[in-house]
Amino acid sequence: MAAKKREMEIEMATEKNVERLLNRISLVFAAVGTLALLHLFSNSSLSCTPAPVVRIDRHVARRHQQDGDSSPRSSCDVAAREVVTPEKRFLKLRSSRAWRRRADAFAALFATLRSARILSNSTNVLCVSAGAGHEVAALQESGVADVTGVDIIDFFPLVRRADPHNLPFFDNVFDLGFSTGVTEALFPARFVSEMERTVRRGGAIVLAVNLPSSAQEVEEIKAMFKKSILLEVRNMTMLGSDMTLIPLIVTYGMTHYDEAKLLSDGGKFRLGFFNPVIEQPNRYISLWFHNISDDSLEWIPSLAPSLDWILVIANRIA
């Protein structure tokens, strides 16, 4: 019994000695780590020391940038670089050749809309899915004062953040809605519905899409609009790509008489500038007169309308 008791005491003493040794080792490593951190905080890295300011010739600096010398070689180089404000970054981007080329292409497109009396300097314009804001810049530079650009990702200062499928605007606010992104929308029908909601009655919606492969694709786009009528369609080339311009007029709640006044020779919009998407005009004319009551025929001679608007409204009735 005495021998066994003696062995237990020896084991307990050994365990205490091992535990005491481990505690001392832990304290030593904690002290070393603390001293190392204090040393790092109290002494700045020599590689991150700001270099003396040296004036470099502008042409030499540009040559270094082309050779890739402007790239940072360490994290210290990145930390020491000048922070560029969003305004300065935007001005630099806006002065680039690619930016100007795309903005000028939109300017030519909007000149077409001016000729059709769809756009003027007093028009309140909404650009949906505006991307980097090329169309917004083109409109502002052409003299349009009230332009709003929205997209999923904002691009200060031209484009603000908003969901094209749920626009944060009241009904009937804008005179013109413009977009190049309807075919890329997640829900095209909802996209179109929001544009019709925010554009006032009698206003216009203009879509620029890739050239449709068939007339059926144009009809599919047209079918998504429940409150508008197709004005005309025109194929065009933009930045080397074939595009189709589709202007529509929001006529929800309007009588045929009001629609005719908008589309007549003396009305707001100028027809015949684009290429009307109308086939078999005689069939549409017969349908037009077939669907008009006798009382409505009185104002037709007084307006002296052109054949174009008769075909457009007849196309809608058909």
Image (tube, rainbow, N blue to C red):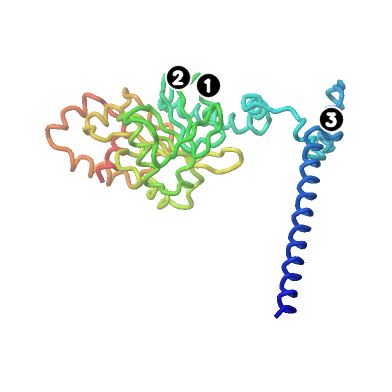
Q: Earlier in the sequence, mark 3 or mark 2?
A: 3
Res 265 → quadrant: top left
Q: Amino acid at mark 3?
A: Thr
| Residue 123 located left or right of residue 99 | left
Kindly state the secondary structure of the residue where label 2 is placed.
Answer: loop
**Residue located farthest toward the left when viewing the structure as drawn:** 295
| Residue 305 located left or right of residue 102 | left
Callout 2–callout 1 Cβ contact below 8 Å: yes
Q: Which residue is mark 2?
A: 121
Rendered residue at 77%/40% (across/down): 37
Kindly state the secondary structure of the residue where label 3 is placed.
Answer: loop
Most foreground residue, 48 or 1: 1
Q: Earlier in the sequence, mark 2 or mark 1?
A: 2
Q: Position of residue 189 (x, y in %)?
A: 37, 47
**What numbered label is drawn on residue 142?**
1
Q: Is residue 139 above or below residue 219?
A: above
Q: Amino acid at mark 1?
A: Ser
| Residue 116 located left or right of residue 9 | left
Residue 245 shows up from this direction: yes
Kindly state the secondary structure of the residue where label 1 is placed.
Answer: loop
Q: Could you tell me which quadrant the N terminus lies in? A: bottom right
Rendered residue at 74%/55% (across/down): 23
Callout 1–callout 3 Cβ contact below 8 Å: no
Q: Position of residue 230 (x, y in %)?
A: 35, 39
CA–CA distance in space, label 3 to label 2: 55 Å
Q: Residues within 10 Å of mark 2 (few under 14, many from 20)?
A: some
Q: Which residue is mark 3?
A: 49
CA–CA distance in space, label 2 to label 1: 8 Å
Residue 263 shows up from this direction: no
Callout 3–callout 2 Cβ contact below 8 Å: no
Most foreground residue, 38 or 187: 38
Q: Give the foreground label among 3 and 2.
A: 3
